[in-house]
């Protein structure tokens, strides 16, 4: 980053890209907003070789952001790759900060405009880095329980089918959020719709979901019952050699059966609402 090269009239993702592209050493990302965390994850997953980003964030903000499966599962991928570490911030500075080995960038919001104000004085950068390195050492880790999206896709392909993984990926790609709180479908509902579209067994998809860390078998069962009661999916009994018959999942509504993958989420959401 050139000396005094303030990043004005930018979007947060532009500032994130500039910082990541101009830095080879570790980065401290301090007090990021909800939008900044989402934008960072969306940008960072496009890079193959990232420096480690130490994110010090408000715990409540982290919880709210990571309630979105899309953001959380991609963040988990970054953590798995050693490119991201999360800890919680007790006392937040006034602004959000990016601290690199060469500069400190303060993110300033003014109405609908965003700027990155750059300070590159060596003594100031060194003092700021030392301050937040010490706060990092004292900060509590944030436990992200969502599984990495790469693991989710790989295991879904192996344990259910490549077609199911393709459907899952396409549906996620058509959504802005996956929370299940009225703003989007959640990961369990998506998994069951994918299983029904590929006529997988409830036992298989719920075992996969529990093993990979998406949700418990009980949660899958409760969600299956809800979707079945609402007519989105249907089931048929499949006899097995020993024990109770297992249930094969099927799409229960022609509107869902006729929708392509890109439309499936929209149709399902309208039916759930």
Image (tube, rainbow, N blue to C red):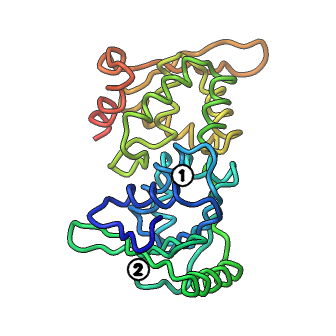
Nearer to us in this view, 21 or 42: 21
Does dot 1 land on a helix, a strand or a loop? helix
Q: Quadrant of the C terminus?
A: top left
Q: Is residue 7 left or right of residue 196?
A: left
Numbered tag placed on residue 62 in the rendering = none
Contact flag, marks 1 and 2 (Cβ < 8 Å):
no
Q: Pointer 2: what residue?
A: 95
Q: Position of residue 261 (x, y in %)?
A: 39, 22
How many labels, in total?
2
Horizontal and vertical percent position of residue 238: 62, 13
Residue 72, numbered label? 1
Q: Residue furthest left?
A: 111
Q: Position of residue 229 (x, y in %)?
A: 40, 32
Residue 14 coordinates in the image, percent (x, y): 38, 56
Q: Residue at x 63, y 47 (%)?
A: 49
**179 lies left or right of 21:** left
Q: Residue at x 51, y 64 (%)?
A: 63
Indicate which disc, 1 or 2, sits on the residue closer to the N terminus.
1
* Left or right: residue 226 compared with residue 146: left
Classed neighbour count for the residue bearing mark 2: other residues with Cα under 10 Å, few (<14), some (14–19), many (≥20) = some
Between 227 and 182, the one nearer to me in the picture: 182
- Furthest residue to the right? 242
Mark 2 secondary-structure assignment = loop
Relative to 239, say whether 128 is above or below: below
Residue name at image x 77 percent, y 12 percent: 241
For the residues labelled 1 and 2, the Cα–Cα distance comes to 24 Å
Q: Is residue 269 above or below residue 36?
A: above
Q: Badge 1: few (under 14), some or many (20 or more) residues near its Cα, within 10 Å? A: many
């Amino acid at each position: 980053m050139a000396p005094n090269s303030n990043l004005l009239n930018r979007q947060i993702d532009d500032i994130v890209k500039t910082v990541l592209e101009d830095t080879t050493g570790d980065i401290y990302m301090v007090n990021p907003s909800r939008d900044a965390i989402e934008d960072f994850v969306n940008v960072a997953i496009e890079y193959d070789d990232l420096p480690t980003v130490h994110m010090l964030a408000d715990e409540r903000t982290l919880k709210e952001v990571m309630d979105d499966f899309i953001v959380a599962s991609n963040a988990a991928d970054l953590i798995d790759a050693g490119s991201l570490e999360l800890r919680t911030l007790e006392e937040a500075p006034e602004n959000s900060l990016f601290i690199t080995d060469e500069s400190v960038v303060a993110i300033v919001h003014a109405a609908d405009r965003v700027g990155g104000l750059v300070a590159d004085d060596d003594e100031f950068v060194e003092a700021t880095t030392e301050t937040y390195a010490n706060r990092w050492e004292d900060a509590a880790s944030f436990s992200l329980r969502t599984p990495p999206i790469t693991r989710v896709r790989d295991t879904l392909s192996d344990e259910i089918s490549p077609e199911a993984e393709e459907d899952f990926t396409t549906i996620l790609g058509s959504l802005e959020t996956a929370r299940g709180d009225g703003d989007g479908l959640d990961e369990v509902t998506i998994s069951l719709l994918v299983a029904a579209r590929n006529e997988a067994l409830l036992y298989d998809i719920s075992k996969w979901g529990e093993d990979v860390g998406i949700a418990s078998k009980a949660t899958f069962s409760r969600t299956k019952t809800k979707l079945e009661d609402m007519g989105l999916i249907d089931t048929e009994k499949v006899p097995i050699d020993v024990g109770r018959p297992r249930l094969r999942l099927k799409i229960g509504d022609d509107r869902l059966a006729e929708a392509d993958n890109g439309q499936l989420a929209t149709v399902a959401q309208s039916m759930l609402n």
